Structures are given as C-alpha cells and as structure tokens.
Image (cartoon, grey):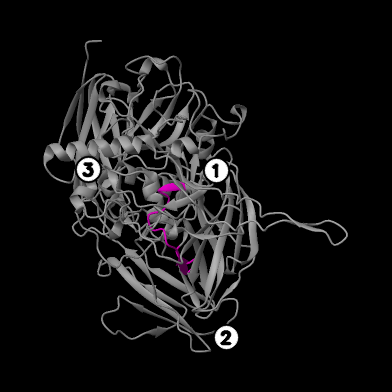
C-alpha cells in the first residue's frame, strides 16, 4: 500500500552573479517525500482467515470457531520470523547438559492445569510463562493468574460470545496486548475457568512491563537462546504442531519429522541433551529433548509434562516465510501500583507495522494529562533484536526534549523507565515520541490496525484525529488518521505517570497466599515527590455499605481454631495528606483457611508391569478455602520398603489421580495419600489402598 505523504516544497535556488547582473534559477523540481508503507500481512494469518471464511460458508453462519481444534491463531504480525534475525544466548560451554525447572527450590512452576475441550492453549501457555517468571524473580510470590479472564477479555474477535471466544483460539501478541493495557492479569481465585462468565470489577494483580521474543532456532542444535531464557526467566511460551500419531505414550515423548501447520502452544521448562533418541515413536537423528509443560492436566504424559525432541520439524524454528506465533517470555510482572496512570490508544496492541522504506522511523502520541503528575515511563514494541531507540517528550511534536535512549537485546514489548520525570499539569497536552531503528526490517513503527478478516481479529480498533503521528525524518510529522487507509489506526506507544498530589499507600503482610494463622497487614504511606506529608492512614475490613474507616498503620485478621474467620477477606485502605488530598481507595485480599483437607482412597488399583498405572483418589474439605491441594502418594511394597513417591497438584473436593509407567516388581503394594492444602493445612490421617502389579509379557 503506497500513500503520498505531505512534504515541504524545496525553496527555489537563487544565485547572484556579478556587476548588477542577477540570474535567478527556477525553482528545483519538487522531491517526493517517502511513502508510508504497511508491512505484508503474515501469510499464516491470511490463510487462517480464508479457512475460517470457508468453514463459515459451509456451516451457514458467520462464526467459524476453528480454534477449538488447535487453540493457536496466527497473528497478522509475523513475530516468529521478525524476532529471528540474530542468535542470542549463552555459549554451549556455559550451559548444563540438563536443566529442569520442576526441581527448582523454591518453586519456579505453578501446578499443571487442564484447558479441557476449549481452544485456550495460548492463554494457559501465556499465564504459565508469566507465573513462572514471577515465581523465579520473586520467591515467595506464588500468584496464580486467570486464563479465563484472558480468554474472555483479550478484546479481540469483537461480537463473539464467551463460548465462541473459548473456541476461537489466540496467540502471544493477543496476551501481550491484554497485559500491556492493564486489563490483567487477575488472580485465578477471582475468575474461575470455563464458566462462560467473568465477574465485573476485578482488580488487576500486576503490571506487565516486558514481553520478550526469543529468536527461533536455526537448526536442531541451535538451542542456546531458549535454554538461556528458561534459566534466566522461567517457562518459555512456544508454538509447535501436535499430531497424535507422533506420540510415544510409554515414555511421554514426542517427535514429528514432518513440517506441518503449528496448532498448539506450550511452555519449555527444561532440557536434557542426552535424552535417548530411542524413546520416540520414530527415532530422530540424534539424542536430546526439551522438557515441555502442557495444559492437558496432570494425567497427560509425565504428570502433565512431556519430552519434545530437539529434531522436531516444527518446534520454535526460525521460519521466515510464515510463522503462527513466536517464542515468548512474559517477564516477571511488577506490583500494580508501580505507576498509577496509563495513557494509551492501542488496547489491542501490535497488529501491523508501518514505515518509510528505512529501518528507522519516528512515531508519537499526543495525550492530555488527566491530573497533576509526572511522566515516569513509556512502552512500545520493537520488531528486531538489537533495536535502538530514543524517547522524547514535550508540549508538541515541534518542541521535544530527549529523555532516554538505548538498545533492546530482543524483539518484543518493552517498557523504558525515564531518567527524568517531566511534570504533567492536569488538563495540559503533552507529546511522547520515539525514534526507533529495527535492524534488517524496514517497517519499524508498531501500530494497532483494524483487521476485519479472521472473525474480525482486531476489527474493534479505532482512532481519532489528534492522537497518533508518524514521521520519516523526525521533523515533519503527519497525523496518522489523515492518511488514506489509516483512519482507525494508532501507533503503539503508551505513557505511564504517577500522581503528584495524592498520597500512595502500600500494604504488606498478606501476599497472594492462603494463611492458616493470623495475618497482620502493615500499611506504609508516602506523599510523592512534592507533598505535604501524611496526616493519617485509614482502613476497613470486609466493608458493607458506608462502613466506618478505622485509623492506623496496621490491622490483624485472626485465624481462630473454630474456623469462624475462614475465607477471603477484603481490606480497603487509603491515606490522607496534610493538604487534605485523599488517596483513591486501594484494596487487597487476605485469605485464611484453617481447615484440614481429608483424603479418601476408595479405589484399589492394578496394573501390568511396563504399562501405565492410574491411582484414583479424592481429597475433600467441608468448607474449602484455598481450593488447591498438593497430594503426596507413597507406594510401598507390603513385603519390603521398595516403592515410589509421586506428587500431584489439584483441586479440593474433586476426583484426582496419579498416573505413571509402572516398572515396580510384581507383587502387592500399599499406596498412601497425604494431602496439604495451599494454606499448609495437612490432613489428620492419610488414606491408603492396595496396588497390585502383575507380570507383563516381557
């Protein structure tokens, strides 16, 4: 698409010769300004849209929902190819031959979950990566986030019902847009999965600052980038192709030598360079496998995990033709009060790229400050590793001051904290601008564009005059909405600010965990860079209606042994400074559970040696609080001490099972179930039953 861009006409050239003889040269021919161009649409996205349209025509309706079969929808931005322009990562000699996040202490992985029959693998892979990065960076913060909220509130495919959204599918850039605009994440306890419903008024638990895209592998042994990301950050979101015919159930191993359309999103959590090639249904050219976390429940594979050969033809490869998704790291989120105001026009994030035929482009947004404050950070997307940037701010595009510059090691969504914090008077206009250079890519400007194909992927995108501007040289700027074809397009550039007038209070002592003992919340207030100091801090517990505020810097929530205070308690708090400025009410949750879970092992089990055994059990709680439970299953021979120990994570008041390939010697065993809920309550007495192992043919 080529669109003429206004540019000043060159001044006529005048040359004065001598002796009162003046020769005036005619004006030079006008030089055409560079044309703004839009990046080619990802071929995979185009093919997906065509498939949806064909399916809808056959079904006789306007909704195709092909995503139910896979869960992965290509992005119109070919992020997998763009992020792969340069290898990254440590040298092979500095990396161990094996690594497994499952064995990390403290834990770096949340319990395995089950997406069920819905096409929501992308949501689980995204939230699992975010949780893993947070648990890795902040030991003790074991927050769990809602996949349901992401699937239903991502903002894409406008007009679809919740059931249709579950089955439509998605990708990592959709998850990034949802997180970047502060729509989420919300806690898992606030929005349960698969109920076609998202409660209103939920609190965003964290602010995501960065989502990095690790370059794709150039060969089966080019794995250092992904390995480094797993060690440094945690679980890495990757797309691949699932074909059940390639699955080796007895060893929980998968290898597909055939290049196929990617259809599933999972997380890489480790690797083993010496994993035997003979463990796969079809023997790959060499040893080595990634350890992969799936979202099909703990009964799948090795407790919900499996081994994926380095030589798989579809795993995280550098694909410069058409890639369904990229290899993403959802970097550890920050507290939700790190900034209090976000200025943005791109709720759906990066859906296209534009440029002037050069790797360098300028883009800007004009905002109006909603209240007095100071500019603290900006965020935007970069399409290539090694992208360089300069951030500026001012009252207009004609008057900008440089605030920050640097280089991004990886492609992705990045937040740049500013070295200085310009004042933003309430009601005043301000402009933030970025000069961005994306090596090897001539469409450097990220934009939100309304794609109406593929079930209206980003059709909800909208823009207004006076919001976004683009430039080929940083001096002549054009309102993007005035350019043909871009009437509903904004550049992807956000600004983050802090209020300069109201106090800010933080609460500590509760975290996201469940507690079986009394919890003391402590409040710490500050009055910003310019303030009159704090006059008082107020709080109220489980307020109803116009409940009275209590004054103090701490409050204790008891946990009596009669369980009378079990449950999730809401604590509201705020501070007031000496000038009378009152902070907007903040909220936190305190979760108390003093009841012990009770395991039941009512089902005996039997298995032929060498086959998969399944131990069924139930863990109840008459009034569940924490809902999540960890079960330890110990299998011991009736005649000796030989046996096996298995750990299973699941939900209270539900049927659970432990599955494993049984190589125990023939004979009778006793399996014992011990249960500990998320608050640390352990059952009074374990439950047990019998496991009989029969001799196999071999």
Residue 14 or residue 142, whichever sits in front: 14
* Residue where numbered disc 1 is placed: 357
Kind of element beneath mark 2: loop
Residue 224 appears in the rendering: yes
Q: Magenta residues: mostly which secondary structure?
A: loop
The numbered disc on residue 532 is 2
In which quadrant will I find the N terminus? Answer: top left
Q: Do the residues under discs 3 and 2 have CB atoms within 8 angstroms?
A: no
Give x and y (percent) for residue 551: 43, 84
Viewer-nearest of discs 1 and 2: 1
Q: Residues within 10 Å of mark 2 (few under 14, many from 20)?
A: some
Kind of element beneath mark 3: loop
Query: Which residues are drawn in magenta?
Result: 336-353
Tell me which corner region of the image, top left, top right, bottom left or bottom right, holds residue 179: bottom left
Outermost residue toward the bottom in this view: 579
Task: Compare marks 1 and 2 and give the one earlier in the sequence.
Answer: 1
Residue 213's place in the image compared with 140, above or below, is above
* Residue where numbered disc 3 is placed: 118
Q: Residue 498 in magenta?
A: no
Kind of element beneath mark 1: loop
Spatial separation of the CA atoms under disc 3 and disc 2: 54 Å
Tell me which corner region of the image, top left, top right, bottom left or bottom right, holds residue 669: top left
């Amino acid at each position: 698409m080529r669109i003429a861009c206004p540019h000043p006409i060159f001044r006529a050239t005048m040359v004065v010769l001598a002796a009162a003889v003046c020769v005036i040269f005619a004006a030079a021919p006008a030089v055409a300004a560079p044309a703004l161009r839009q990046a080619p649409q990802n071929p995979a996205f185009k093919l997906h849209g065509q498939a949806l349209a064909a399916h809808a025509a056959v079904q006789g309706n306007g909704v195709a929902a092909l995503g139910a079969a896979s869960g992965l929808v290509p992005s119109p931005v070919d992020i997998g190819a763009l992020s792969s322009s340069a290898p990254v990562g440590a040298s092979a000699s500095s990396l161990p031959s094996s690594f497994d996040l499952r064995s990390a202490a403290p834990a770096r992985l949340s319990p395995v979950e089950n997406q069920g029959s819905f096409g929501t693998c992308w949501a689980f892979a995204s939230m699992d990566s975010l949780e893993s990065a947070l648990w890795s960076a902040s030991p003790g913060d074991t927050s769990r986030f809602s996949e349901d909220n992401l699937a239903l509130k991502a903002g894409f495919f406008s007009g679809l019902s919740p059931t249709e959204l579950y089955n439509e599918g998605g990708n990592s850039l959709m998850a990034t847009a949802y997180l970047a605009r502060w729509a989420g994440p919300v806690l898992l306890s606030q929005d349960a999965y698969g109920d076609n419903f998202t409660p209103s008024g939920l609190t965003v638990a964290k602010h995501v600052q960065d989502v990095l895209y690790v370059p794709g592998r150039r060969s089966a042994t080019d794995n250092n980038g992904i390995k480094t990301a797993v060690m440094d950050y945690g679980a890495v979101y990757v797309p691949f192709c699932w074909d059940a015919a390639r699955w080796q159930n007895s060893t929980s191993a998968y290898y597909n030598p055939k290049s196929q359309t990617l259809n599933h999103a999972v997380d890489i959590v480790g690797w083993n360079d010496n994993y035997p090639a003979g463990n796969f249904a079809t023997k790959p050219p060499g040893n080595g496998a990634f350890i992969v976390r799936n979202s099909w429940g703990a009964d799948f594979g090795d407790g919900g995990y499996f081994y994926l050969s380095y030589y798989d033809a579809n795993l995280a490869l550098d694909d410069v033709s058409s890639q369904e998704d990229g290899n993403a790291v959802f970097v550890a989120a920050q507290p939700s009060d790190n900034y209090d105001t976000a200025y943005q026009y791109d709720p759906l994030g990066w859906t296209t790229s534009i440029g002037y035929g050069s790797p360098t482009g300028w883009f800007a947004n004009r905002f109006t400050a909603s209240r007095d404050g100071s500019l603290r950070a900006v965020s935007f997307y970069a399409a290539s590793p090694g992208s360089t940037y300069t951030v500026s701010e001012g009252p207009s595009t004609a008057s900008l001051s440089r605030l920050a510059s640097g280089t991004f090691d990886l492609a992705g969504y990045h937040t740049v904290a500013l070295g200085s914090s310009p004042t933003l008077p309430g009601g005043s206009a301000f402009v933030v601008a970025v000069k961005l250079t994306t090596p090897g890519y001539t469409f450097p400007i990220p934009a939100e564009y309304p794609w109406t194909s593929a079930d209206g992927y980003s059709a909800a995108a909208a823009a207004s005059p006076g919001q976004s501007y683009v430039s080929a040289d940083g001096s002549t700027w054009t309102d993007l909405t005035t350019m043909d074809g871009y009437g509903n397009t904004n550049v992807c550039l956000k600004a983050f600010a802090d209020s300069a007038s109201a106090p800010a209070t933080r609460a500590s002592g509760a975290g996201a965990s469940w507690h079986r003992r009394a919890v003391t919340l402590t409040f710490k207030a500050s009055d910003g860079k310019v303030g009159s100091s704090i006059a008082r801090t107020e709080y109220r517990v489980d307020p109803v209606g116009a409940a009275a505020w209590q004054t103090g810097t701490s409050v204790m929530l008891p946990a009596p042994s009669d369980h009378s205070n079990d449950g999730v308690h809401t604590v509201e708090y705020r501070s007031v400074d000496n000038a009378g400025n009152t902070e907007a009410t903040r909220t936190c949750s305190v979760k108390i559970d003093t009841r012990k879970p009770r395991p039941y092992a009512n089902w005996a089990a039997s298995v032929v040696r060498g086959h998969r055994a399944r131990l069924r059990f139930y863990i109840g709680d008459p009034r569940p609080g924490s809902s999540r439970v960890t079960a330890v299953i110990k299998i011991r021979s009736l005649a000796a001490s030989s046996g096996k120990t298995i750990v299973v994570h699941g939900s209270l008041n539900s049927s659970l099972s432990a599955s494993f390939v049984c190589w125990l010697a023939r004979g009778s065993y006793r399996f014992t179930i011990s249960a500990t809920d998320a608050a640390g309550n352990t059952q009074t007495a374990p439950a047990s039953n019998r496991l009989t192992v029969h001799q196999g043919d071999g």
